[in-house]
Image: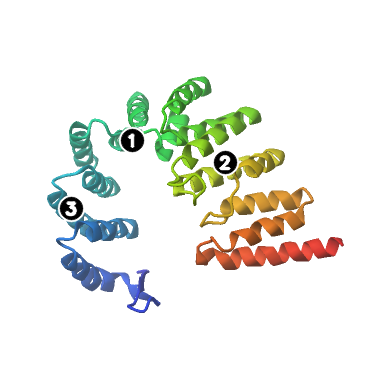
Amino acid sequence: MGQIPLFDELGHLIWTDREEFRHHVIPENIKADWDNAQNLYSFVVQLYKDGFLEEAEQGADRLLELSNREEEALLLKVLVLMKKEENEQAQELLQECIDRFPERGVAHTYLARLYAHRSQREQVIAHLQEGLKKEPNQETGLRMLSEWMGDSEKVIAFLTMLTEQEEAWWPSLELGRLFLLEGRSEEALEQFSQAMIRTRAYREDPEGLPEWEEEVAAMTASALLRKEGRFSEVLRFCEQFWTPAYVTPFHGLDYAHTLDESGQTQKAVEVLSRMLEYLDPEYTNVVSMRIEQFKGKALSKT
């Protein structure tokens, strides 16, 4: 029947049966947060992820009341309906969302997903393009467009147009990915660099800590470069944009592994060591273990 992870008041992980969770935990939490939109939203999202769709729909309906049918609540209800395969009602709500918030783009991307389910290619592409013009930093929408459009020249032309928007950075990552697939590594690096410059502008202080968008751009770019075996480009990219101050280790690990593979194992140790004070605690053991492995490797070479 499955188990659901919970945390007690001391933060200890406990497990409960799904039916116990359904009949006791869910009603208590929904009742407690019935008039608290922020808490209720978080709980409904978790219910959706855990597959409690009827209960999630109840909470989503309450959020529509509390928010006066704001975009976030409408889209959450749509996600639940799509998971339940109630696509006609989902489409009605998406059209309402588009009518109420015409400057926003996520509803168009969700609508494209419905059309994709029906294999209606023209409608998929049209809604993806409309949604991305309004909100270009939609990773799912960008990847869907690349898949459904098919013609790489047309995709590249559209993404290039999106990158001209001042706030756009994900289109540069997707454009860089496509350039890599075509063997155009220098052009890919240019796009990855543009994504980094755009996301670095999100910092409150230019010399301060990076925002999450910058971290996502960095880890995405280095992962794509390593996947395509562009190790010299990884080093060039990281030498320009790496910072130890990310809360996740993924970009730094890409940098360190590439340094090690290029014979710079001691520098790899230094990179990972500088990261430790900034990492989220859940990652420190993994990085510490990798540091020890690299230290051992460096010693064996002396």
Q: Is residue 54 visible?
A: yes
Taking depth in this image into account, of 66 and 207 the one nearest to the observer is 207
Taking depth in this image into account, of 30 and 253 the one nearest to the observer is 253
**Distance (Cα) linking label 1 and label 2:** 24 Å
**Lower sequence index among marks 1 and 3:** 3
**Lower sequence index among marks 3 and 2:** 3
How is this picture coloured? Answer: rainbow
Instruction: Judge whether 251 appears above or below 88 on screen.
Output: below
Which residue matches tag 3?
A: 63
In the image, what residue type sits under mark 1? Thr
Q: Any mark on residue 221, and which? A: 2
- Residue drawn at 67 percent across, 63 percent down: 290
Q: Position of residue 150 (x, y in %)?
A: 48, 25
Q: Secondary structure at mark 3?
A: helix
- Residue drawn at 35 percent across, 72 percent down: 6
**Lower sequence index among marks 1 and 2:** 1
In the image, what residue type sits under mark 2? Ala
Judge from the rendering whether residue 150 lies leftward or rightward of residue 141; answer left or right: right
Q: Is residue 183 visible?
A: no
In the image, what residue type sits under mark 3? Leu
**Label 2 CA crowd tier, 10 Å (few <14, some 14–19, many 20+):** many
**Distance (Cα) linking label 1 and label 3:** 22 Å
Judge from the rendering whether residue 140 lies leftward or rightward of residue 37; answer left or right: right
Looking at the rendered image, the quarter that the C terminus falls into is bottom right
Judge from the rendering whether residue 105 lies leftward or rightward of residue 143; answer left or right: left
Looking at the rendered image, the quarter that the N terminus falls into is bottom left
Q: Any mark on residue 109, and which? A: 1
Taking depth in this image into account, of 38 and 144 the one nearest to the observer is 38
- Residue drawn at 43 percent across, 26 percent down: 162
Q: Quadrant of residue 50?
A: bottom left
Q: Position of residue 295 (x, y in %)?
A: 75, 64
